Amino acid sequence: MTTLADPHTESFRLSMLLNDTRYRSLTFQFIALVAIIAFMAFVGGNLVRNLAAAGLNISYEFLGSQAGYDINQRPIEYTSQSTHGRAALVGLLNTLIVAFLACITATIIGVIAGVLRLSNNWIVSKLMSFYVEIFRNVPVLIWILIIFSIMINTAPAPRDFRGDDPAASMWLFDTIAVTNRGVYIPKPVWGEGSLLVLGVFLASIVGIFLFRRYARKQLFDHGRLIPTFWPSVGLFFIPAILAQLVLGSPISLDYPSLQGFNFRGGITILGSLIALWFALAIYTGAFIAENVRAGILAISKGQTEAAGALGLRPNRIMSLVVLPQALRVIIPPLISQYLNITKNSSLAIAVGYMDVTGTLGGITLLQTGRAIETVLLLMLFYLTISLLISFFMNIFNERMKLQER
Amino acid sequence: MSDTHAQTVAFVRETEIPPAPPPASQAGAVKWVRENLFSGPFNTIMTLLALYFIYKIFMGAFPWFANGVWDAGSIRECRDKVTASGAETGACFAVLVDRWDHLMFGFKYPADAYWRPLVAFLVMLVAIAPVLFSKVFPRKMLILTALYPFLAFWLIWGGSLWVPLTILAAIIVTGMIFKFVESLDVGARTILAAVVGAGAGAGLAYLLFTGAQELWFIAGSIGNATILTLISSTLFMALSVFTYAMFIPMGIFVGYAIYNDAEDGGLVTIVTSLAAIYVMLAYLLGPVSGTLNSIIPIELQAVPSRDMGGYMLCMILGVVCVSLSIPLGIILALGRQSNMPLIKGVCVVFIEFIRGVPLITLLFVANVMLAYFMPPESNFDLILRVIIMITMFSSAYIAEVIRGGLAALPKGQYEAADSLGLNYTQATRLIILPQALKISIPGIVNVAVGLFKDTTLVSVISMFDIVGMIRGPIQQSTDWISIYWEVYLFAALVFFVVCYSISQYSQWLERQLNTSHR
């Protein structure tokens, strides 16, 4: 008869820390921890010594002191009397503005180019391939500099607009002036009652959402197809315009006009902002085009054929069957393209657009000599933006995900 | 019925009609044009629009290009020549001829040494060939690839040949030590293990000791004002006490562990080799290479890093950073997959941090901040600092690409490796990594191309790479003031050629490595 012995329990030996896979990971982590602590201590000790030698200390007090430099593009009130902190804030807003503009433009360009590259028109698809390959394979910095050079070298100077027979003229019924100092566009003036118009506009946007939801419910519950596109467009424009007319045009536009040596009035968009915006948009648009193309190609032909067999018309096949599935493939890389735009907008420093790298990481750093503090703040800012963008886009991504039941 | 039909047939053809060509509208160019360009009203409009667009571009660019002046000393002379020839517009390519050397090598690299980077570049093409086209070139050429870094370093930076040769010798000697220790019998290895273990334990303990000293120092230098400093100070104190307390046990433990491992042999060989190469590089490099050089001087004129510039700088940064960041990226990706929480955490924080900030801020770190973290008397070369930061940057991206490859591997591959009894190193090296890397090739190439393009960003921290060269010394010189189309298009062309060929190569490689059976 065999007796079942208890499994032999080994007593713990020191060498098991190295030879036994159960304990080995602990050993390695401990050694890694020691190394990290030693490294941190080494770096920190050097930092303390170097700062002491330079007579510096880590302090963020400089953010409260007077900046003393001008910022040419400022979305909020700022003068050279303002503080460094406010300058950083202006730069931060400038970064967000250019990133936002570039993201939208790049998406539009990318979607158009991506769809056109799949066109069965040979010339058009080849043209789009050229666009994608040329813009993808050349550094974005070079594109920024090229567009900036075009802006300041080939656009007419403000004085060309003067005289009875001017060399240059304004665009769109004398409302937009493109000059080598920047582009001047009309600026809205908020008069009495403009809040009401704005309210009507916001309400009509809410109305569009409600209407679309109602239409979808009708479609799903009763199979009734209500057209949504034209009613939405109408709802978007008509109530606000009506309100504007009824209330006697409370929102008016301040047009730029040539006064003295330069244009006055309106909103000035600097050449550097335009260079950055367009360069980022066309550069990233080429990448987005590839993502869009890959997304559409990833949808198997059977889906289109099945939808066709159900009797759907081509545009409905696109909007109800192909696009919703393609979006799942397109959105994740799109998120990282948006992040890339935001990070690449730091190249503003090359053309003198005062984004946060230009103010906080540029002039403030030079003036105060506080390298560590400014660079850390800069990194913190970009990290926050990156994490926020990917957080929101991931939520969106989650909602678009295939619902498996 | 069929009968009646058979009766009604009046004529049966007995010969075949010779095949006729399809109608002209259904064959050849006409059919192609109809199908691809004018298949519908919308398509026709698109074609016409595209043709108009191409026509405008061509009419705008061609005269400018065709009337280009290739031989002039300044932009004024250029313009005069163009107007003298009666043309309205004309490019001024003369700037490329005039400043070719500067665009390629920067404006401070000694002119009589231009052949050196050129040779380094040509040899690079030879050295990289067996890696890129492993089926065409013999494997023995890989020896040249291994030697190439030393040769290129000597050619580009100059100085004594004996410095890279001594480093090479140190690496070879380390390899020989590794082989030798592996071949020792158990008795000899036990003795060696005891010695090495004691040394390594003492080394680690020394590391701890200096770390603790630094912690004391930091804690002491923090002021005594607020609660926060009090807390951090206490934390530092606690940590330093901890490390002090671990000083001796640590040494004993490591020594014992290595001693105990002697029968296995793995750790002894690794630690011995590491210790040997550390000693050789830290203490023997200077004296040995100095002595050898005084006996047989083989020297090239030394060029300091700050004199490098132009396209050469982009190439150096691109090649060095890509080749360094691939192994680093693999390590980071494996670390992120690891089930050790500490290692995993460090890797995750590193990757996410680096990916969250733009490269420019990292270059700022290299430029203004890194010096604060180095020992006071050390003077780090700017190119080296930039290389470190760019390598960290791209390795984080490569790590994410490889992580994708690792995640894409079916779980069965890991289980199969386990069931074969392979340990972690063997499984990773033989089964997991080859497949994961194959999946990640397109991604890695994308990162590499992106990195190569990003080398232009060093112009922002006033280094004179090709873009910095154009923006600074060329556009601001009196001869070539504010010239932009010609130089920027040239820079764009240079980058396009390299990046486009790399991406074409990667597509070719993907097809080559496609082992799936379809």
Image (spheres, coloured by chain):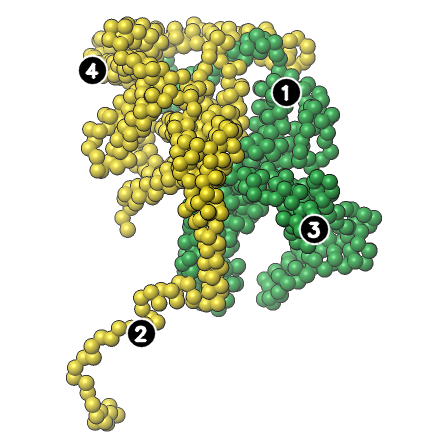
Chain colours: A green, B yellow
Q: Which residue is mark 1?
A: A367
Q: Chain of mark 2?
A: B
Q: Chain of mark 1?
A: A
Q: Is residue B168 visible?
A: yes
The quadrant in which residue B138 appears is top left
Q: Is residue A299 visible?
A: no
Q: Nearer the viewer, residue A77 or A68?
A: A68
Numbered mark located on residue B395 in the image: none
Between tags 3 and 4, which lies in front?
3
Sequence order check, earlier mark of 2 and 4: 2
Q: Few, some or many C-alpha atoms within 10 Å of disc 4 (few <14, some 14-19, many ≥20)?
A: few
Numbered mark located on residue B183 in the image: 4
Mark 3 lies on a secondary structure that is: loop
Between tags 3 and 2, which lies in front?
3
Q: Few, some or many C-alpha atoms within 10 Å of disc 2 (few <14, some 14-19, many ≥20)?
A: few
Between tags 2 and 4, which lies in front?
2
Task: Report the side of B139 relative to B195 (left or right).
Answer: left
Position of residue B298 measured from the top left corner of the image (x, y, whole percent) = 27, 12
Q: Which amino acid type is marked by label 2? A: Pro
Q: Which residue is mark 2?
A: B23
The quadrant in which residue A368 appears is top right
Q: Few, some or many C-alpha atoms within 10 Å of disc 3 (few <14, some 14-19, many ≥20)?
A: few
Alpha carbons under labels 3 and 4: distance apart: 95 Å
Disc 2 and disc 1 on one polypeptide chain: no
Give the answer, above or below, for where A214 lies relative to B178.
Answer: below
Q: Chain of mark 4?
A: B
Task: Report the side of B137 relative to B101 (left or right).
Answer: left
Alpha carbons under labels 2 and 4: distance apart: 81 Å
Q: Residue at x 81, y 47 (%)?
A: A191
Q: Chain of mark 3?
A: A
Alpha carbons under labels 2 and 1: distance apart: 79 Å
Give the answer, above or below, for where A133 lies relative to B279.
Answer: below
